[in-house]
Amino acid sequence: QVQLVQSGSELKKPGASVKISCKASGYTFTNYAMHWVRQAPGQGLEWVAWINTNTGNPTYAQGFTGRFVFSSDTSVSTTYLQINSLKAEDTAIYYCARVRYFDPLVFDIWGQGTMVTVSS
Amino acid sequence: DIQMTQSPSTLSASVGDRVTITCRASQSISSRLAWYQQKPGKAPKLLIYKASTLESGVPSRFSGSGSGTEFTLTIGSLQPDDFATYYCQQYNSYWTFGQGTKVEIK
């Protein structure tokens, strides 16, 4: 069946880096874009970035440029989100979600989420 | 950037109630509006897209309406499984979520 399986929880110190993954299965990976969405504890959903899985070209939301790096490896149907120079405010659940390349551009399948905790 | 504003933030209701959630966009988004349901500890689930089209498998008690800047999500007869947080999302220009509406048991 169609699914996105994310890597496990991470506990990092401020200033460190983390790289989380999202592995797709059950569909043709390059037929869909991949997105990341962040949810801070007790808060709402915030769109982070998307990547064209055909070209590997990422686009970031405002506020997520510089420290966030979104990459893709079509050979293993997996996308990665790396966050550098971690801050306490990066503590959140990060979800990956797939989106078609044509309307409606909605998030129809989601990963289970990866909890990233930044604490000294 | 397009801002999405939901109301109310919290809604207390009983099983069987008809429930309506409103979502307003800061500028016109045509009908490029989706609704998601999120339960505690779970990923969001797509309910409705193009303002009023039900995603496959979603119960018919859910309905959506609106276009331009004002949209509504209606649950015709609230069921125990529907107590959750609901988010609207625009996809007309990048992607933006509303702040969420928690539907809780009265």
Image (cartoon, grey):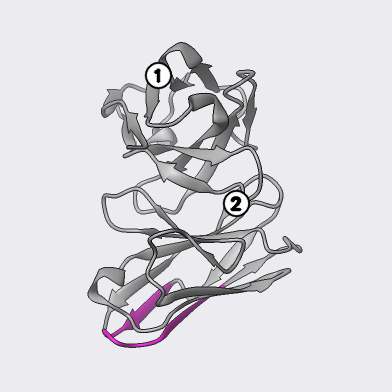
Of residues B71 and B60, the one nearer the viewer is B60
Give coordinates of residue A62: x percent, y percent.
65, 37
> Which residue extends farthest top?
A75
- Give the dominant element type of the magenta stretch: helix, strand or loop: strand
Mark 2 → mark 1, Cα distance in angstroms: 24 Å
Count of numbered labels shown in the rendering: 2
Which circle marks residue B96 in the picture? 2
2 and 1 marks on the same chain: no
Taking B5 as reference, is B93 left or right? right
> Which image quadrant is residue A17 in?
top left
**Mark 2: which secondary structure?**
strand
- Placement of the N terminus of chain A among the 4 image quadrants: top left
Of residues A84 and A14, the one nearer the viewer is A84
Give coordinates of residue B60: x percent, y percent.
41, 74
* Residue at image point 49% right, 38% down: A98
Q: Is residue A17 above or below residue B60?
A: above
* Residue at image point 26% right, 50% down: B41
Give coordinates of residue B10: x percent, y percent.
40, 74
| Part of the protein shown in magenta | B10-22
Give coordinates of residue B61: x percent, y percent.
40, 77
Which circle marks residue B35 in the picture? none
Kindly identify which residue carries mark 1.
A19
Q: Residues within 10 Å of mark 2 (few under 14, many from 20)?
A: many
Taking B74 as reference, is A105 left or right? right
